[in-house]
Amino acid sequence: MRYGTYQLGNKTSACAILGTHAYDLAQAFFKHYRRPYKFVDLLAFLQAGGAEKLAEVELGRMKEDKTVALPLKEVRLRAPILRPPKIVCVGLNYRDHAMEQKKEPPAAPLLFSKAANVVIGDGDAIRIPAGISDKVDYEVELGVVIGTKAQHVSESKALDYVAGYAVVNDVSERHFQMGPGGQWDRGKGCDTFGPVGPWLVTTDEITDPHVLDMWLDVNGEKRQRGNTRTMIYNVPTLVSYVSQFMTLLPGDIITTGTPPGVALGMKPTPGWLKVGDVVTLGIQGLGEQRQKILAFPGK
């Protein structure tokens, strides 16, 4: 199943994406259960335990109901989780990327966080802080979206707590991150620096998240090519590790690292993103997203 959040006019709602239509999950639940539901995004749906209840709803029988089944071409897909409770990121988690950075693989998962203000969706613009930023980088990453509360879970049970997976672009300002007075939160936390989407794909469709091809292009130029099999710490290990000291909640996103090809590692000149560039990235089975680079404030 592919889940998302759509916008039509001023309304946003969680949806299931079947073929060429977005099925409004709040409307579908209302038609089935005969009481109102409000799923303003996929987070609200997950928090309500909607995924477990959906099997009773039989979406396929509602394909002719125009209040439920909306043509994808008539709606805008937003980031699936508009404001995640937490975004936990893993650095240097691909062996070939660690080699590219001339760093030893970390002895334990290297974690940092992003705030919810970074999240945008497919087609939204990444905005460079105007006048103070000139080293903006990209990173295609597998995003793991938590479906149920996870606390002190074992590796063997960790995937039971995962709702699904999504494409994430971990955008960074390397001068903010590594320059004088550099801080990871500052370099990673600028508005729009966390595109997610276009949708979430559930674990029944992605039964093994460690065999997926990944790619990222800038203006049609190949930059990143990799596969999730080169992760140092795999998805169950990361979910279990984080849950030992930080309770994971529905809608939390763990970003799991990136393969080689980032702008920082390009020789002889880093290929920093600049205003006007177009970034396209995707992961096998999870779809593709596209962003244009603009200045912030917008011009």
Image (cartoon, rainbow, N blue to C red):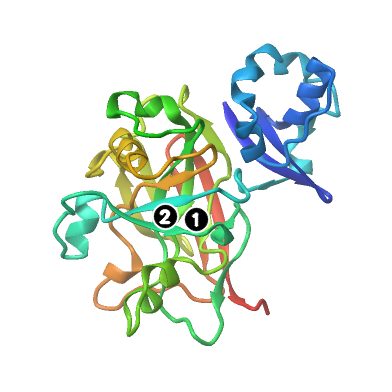
Residue at mark 2: 216
Query: Which residue position holds label 1?
Result: 280
For numbered disc 1, what is the local secondary structure? strand
167 displayed left or right of 75: left
**Disc 2/disc 1 C-alpha distance (Å):** 6 Å
- In the displayed structure image, the side of residue 270 where residue 87 appears, left or right: right
* Relative image position of residue 95 (x, y in whole percent): 19, 50
- Pointers 2 and 1 in contact (CB under 8 A)? yes
The residue that appears at 33% across and 81% down in the rendered structure is 179
* Residue 30 placement (x, y as % from top left): 81, 23
Which of the pair 161/176 is nearer the observer?
A: 161
Could you tell me which quadrant the C terminus lies in? bottom right
- For the point 61% across and 77% down, which residue is it? 296
Would residue 270 be seen by someone viewing this image from the given angle?
A: yes
Looking at the rendering, in which quadrant would you find the N terminus?
Answer: top right
Camera-nearest residue between 121 and 106: 106
Label 2's element?
Answer: strand
Q: Amino acid at mark 1?
A: Thr
Q: Is residue 172 visible?
A: no
Q: Is 156 drawn above or below residue 118 in the view shown?
A: above
Q: First in sequence: mark 2 or mark 1?
A: 2
Q: Residues within 10 Å of mark 2 (few under 14, many from 20)?
A: many
- Taking the spot 71% from the left edge, 15% from the top edge, the residue there is 57
Image location of residue 229, percent across then percent down: 26, 38
Q: Which mark is residue 248?
A: none
Tag 2: amino acid: Leu
